[in-house]
Amino acid sequence: MSTIRLPLPLRALPLALTFALAPAIAADTGVGVDTWRANKFDPSAGAASQSVDHRGTSWLRSGELRTPTGYLYMCPAEDPHVDDFGAWIGYGVLQIGAVATSGDDRNALWNRYVDWDSGLVLGLLDYTWQRPADGTYANVRASRISEDDQYYQAVFGRAGSYKVQAFLRDMPNVLSRNARSLWDGVGSNTLTLPAGLTPAASTPQQVATVIAARPDQSLSVTRSKQGLGFNMYLSSQWTAYANLADEQRSGARPYGGPFFFNYPFPANGGVLETPKPIDDHTLNLNAGLRYASRSWRMELGYSGSFYRDRWTRYTYQMPFALWAVVPGSASAPLTTGQMAMEPDNDYHNVKASFTRKLPLDGELSLTASAGRMSQDDTLIAPIDCQGVFGIGLGGNLALGPANPFLFDCSKWNTPAALSRRTADMSIDTTLLDARASLRPTATLSLRGGLRFNRDDYRNGYLAWNPLTGDYGYIAENGSQGSIVPGEVGLFNPLRMASNLTRVRSMPLDLQTIDADVGADWRLGSANTLGATLALNRFEPTNRERTRLDDTSLKLTWVNRTTDWLTLRVNYTWKDSSGDRYNFDPYHHFYSTSLPGYVPPAAGTPSHTVEAMRKYDLSSRRTHKVDVMATVMPRDDMTISASLRGDWNSYDAVIGRRALNTNSATLQWEWQPRPTTSLSLYGAWDRSQLSLSNVQDQQAGAGVDPSLGGPNYALIGQWWLRDSQRNLYGGATLDHRIGHVRIDANWNYVQSRGLDDYSYAGSSALAYPGTVTGTGPGSGGFPAMTYRVQSFTVGVTVPIHQRVSLRVFDYYERGHVSDWHYAGFDANRIYDHRVYTDGGPQSYRANLVGVLLNVKL
Amino acid sequence: MNANTMPRRALFILLPLLLAAAVSAQAQSTAKPTAAGKWLDKRGHAPIHGDAAAGQTKSEVCRACHGQDGNTPVPTFPNLGGQRADFLYWELIELKHGYRYQSPMTEQLAPLSDQDVRDLAAFFASQPLAHAHDASADPAAIELGERIFHSGDAQRGVPPCQGCHGTNADGIAQRPGWPILQGQHPAYLAARLRAYRDGDPPNSSNDFIMNGVARGLDDAAIDGLAAWLVSRGGTQHQ
């Protein structure tokens, strides 16, 4: 289906319909249609620009009010200027002005999720009409920063009766501003080499020359979304709702493009970073009925999601020639690679929930839902080639029994090469959930729940070519089999009877059962104790374990002994264990399961090392501690602090061994007056991930899976410690001097990642030759850092009762150090590797703006 | 920015501005000068203390209108006897400093010191609460008034009065700045409620509350509340 972006007038149809259909339908705020409208220009959706009401938060008491957890509420905004239109009243705000950017204002990080553009901007138009006699209202809301960064919303309704809303929204995601695509046709599904380059026959030098002449270009994906929502009261107990939203994505992003390894095969293979086209849309729909009475609540609902991609695949031309590693043999030229796009998907889900009040202030809720995700895309041919692919022995590219490693493209580049023409796949989901709570005494509450969930895969796919009788998936666009004889990724009981290759799709059915019981007990007025015991059983299919049980106990303590302190402490203990761990449950999905498979003379290579434990199914022990304190030293001040620890120990020699995270936060808020507020924020967190793996030694044909055996010898073991440390800081000031408002904001984020490794011997390394000797050693990769600071200063001056002028400056400085992209400024071509994205760049950029704020 | 698209984009942004300006020009502004008006903030003050005996000697002029013990026979004047001292003090301060537009009380309170006002408040608070009665009140009106006082009127957005004025309209101990209503003259009560309902500019932070509360009251509700409150009689507030 084509997903050509509609022109704005057509996309505005839902907005027009909002007003046309409004009287027939009606309101409930329970289900929203993207109810938050904001952008990076004003993430607060207009709240930040409103003047604070200097009269305070409440007429009933002085000072600021606090949330139940002790934080100060922000003061409300000033009353709007209300205009009288007879039976209607109206009020609103218009922010309009101009911005100018400078510095590195094309930088991708500076433009992430925003499309800054010097010129006029509509910061916000927000206008509300109300008819007090019957509570009818209408609201329009709009903001436009640039062509790809804008939203418009209209709402119409009557309080307690109905509500209709519609919106349009465009949001950009700039991924790269320094991309240099080797290919023409960026954004389409056909990427071709430019004139001067010959597919499968160009040299790295020729490619580098073309790339060097390319100007930097932008790769971005814009999301354009429009929606329509209806809510209505059918009676005092029944409500109905229906929401529809359609989102299109368009653009291109850096992606992959495999043509087999290049590092171990210099001047061979191909690693291509292609610009993947993005052109899809998703239609989301939900509708239902709700019932609420004093003792019953009920909801019957349907939700659906329909994903459509314009393309089923995209193709890219391969610039480089491949050559077979067997001396004297020839490799057929491969000119084109292909990449499947995400499949179209239909999702349906129906849900019913019932809640009944129980004696002892209790409640019982039952929920059941069933859903189906289905995909039936037309499948793409296994390869896009002409002539032959593979290796011709003796330099001969003639098909025939004498050339067992050479394949006929015409028998693989057609849908007739597939065992069926469409995907015909689906996953059924089932959910049953029951929860109950009781409050037998004023100081004791009890709760419990039971939840059952299943994901059932329907159908599977056997990769079998009826034209050839071969099984399997062609590897790396045919390149692997064109470089290494026999590694084409296929099995045939007559011609390739000992080839080990994947031949089926893998259904990952899953059943989970969760049960929990808990109690909260209030001890006097100052202390509350709580405990929750939870049991979770995971029963996956076609995985290393058929059962994994999580048992957890969470203890909580809340203390309010003094008026000025709320202390909360949580501790969680969790143990995960299961049945026997089978390191290779995948026999059924490989050629070893097919009749006619003949193990190689030395035996079938092992799937992986026996000691490997995948982290999601590994036995582990977890301890978590949270200590949170909210201190109220004065009525107008709050200090909050927290310490958190999350320590996970895995029962694994090979695989993830530990993941520990510690963090601390400290925040200070002060609101001495309604028109003055200050805050400071600081946070630190550090996580460490430890894992180990072992390099196979290519010994004994790789048959023995045991750690310490000839293939997975201990000399090949290595250990990695990944450390991630983040620092956050922030400060805000909002102060009014006379009628002039001053606001200032500072934010700081620093992230630093470091990988240290050690190894038992040099044979643990991919490139043993890069170190001296064969014994143990250690090393580390350069630190990856990301540091961004931003400052905002604004002054708002009233120039009329209804008009104020805001002058502001936003400065942002970012420093990025990512060694993966080192050297890309000078060169994007390394042998047969082609990189499109130049990577994140450090920057300093500034935005200065003037906004006229008019109370309409 | 592309120079070709600039005029179109400028038009796009200026259009809503022109529309909004046109709408505003057509509209008749009914904004009330509440935000910029002068009003007394009665929130968050410490309890007041005064000398009741001294207040008695200073109350001669007051008693001419409000009665010897603060309970006046004139139905349009408020009874002061037995009222809360904090409430009386802040009402007097509001009058003394001219927050209430052109009130004759302002001139009369002008020569008094703050201590004088505290003493007067203490004196009237120490007097017995009025025992006003209105034998002519319609029972149906009294019933309506009681219902609104205790339950409010959800459909009109009127909260129950008892939340701030006490179950028996005898005040709430934790809120000394809010008045006792029982036994007050119905004519005076009705006049004040109508003033709140009709949007008289607020003179104090409490008036902002009452403006919102009274907005949903019609004449029948106001008369019913006044009738029920006076029917509560008066008991000496402790």
Image (cartoon, helix red, strand yellow):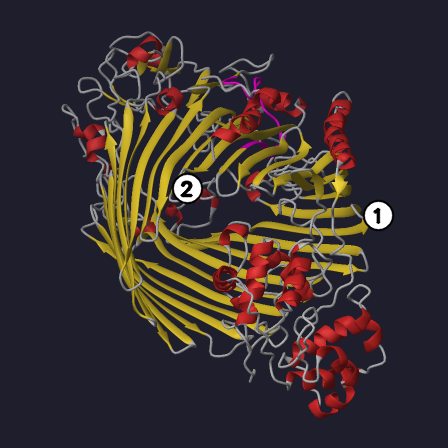
Left or right of A474? Residue A543 is left
Q: Which residue is mark 2?
A: A766
Residue that numbered label 1 is attached to? A799
Determine the image quadrant of residue A418: top left
The magenta segment is A166-190
Q: Secondary structure at mark 1?
A: loop
The amino acid pointed to by label 1 is Ile
Q: Residue B41 placed where, x, y %?
A: 71, 68
A819 in relation to A503, above or below: below
Quadrant in which the C terminus of chain B is drawn: bottom right
- Mark 2 and mark 1 in contact? Answer it, CB < 8 Å: no
Which x, y percent locates residue A782? 55, 50
Name the foreground residue: A519 vs A804: A804
Determine the chain carrying the residue at label 1.
A
In terms of depth relative to the viewer, which is nearer, A61 or A708? A61
Residue at 31 percent of width and 27 percent of height: A374
Which quadrant holds the N terminus of chain B?
A: top right
Q: For mark 2, does the 10 Å Cα neighbourhood hold few (<14), some (14 to 19), or many (20 or more) residues?
A: few
- Is residue A476 at all visible to an observer of this figure? yes
Tell me the amino acid under the disc marked 2. Ala
Identify which residue is drawn at 60% across, 13% down: A196
Q: Secondary structure at mark 2?
A: loop
Query: In the image shown, does A493 or A764 lie closer to the viewer?
Result: A493
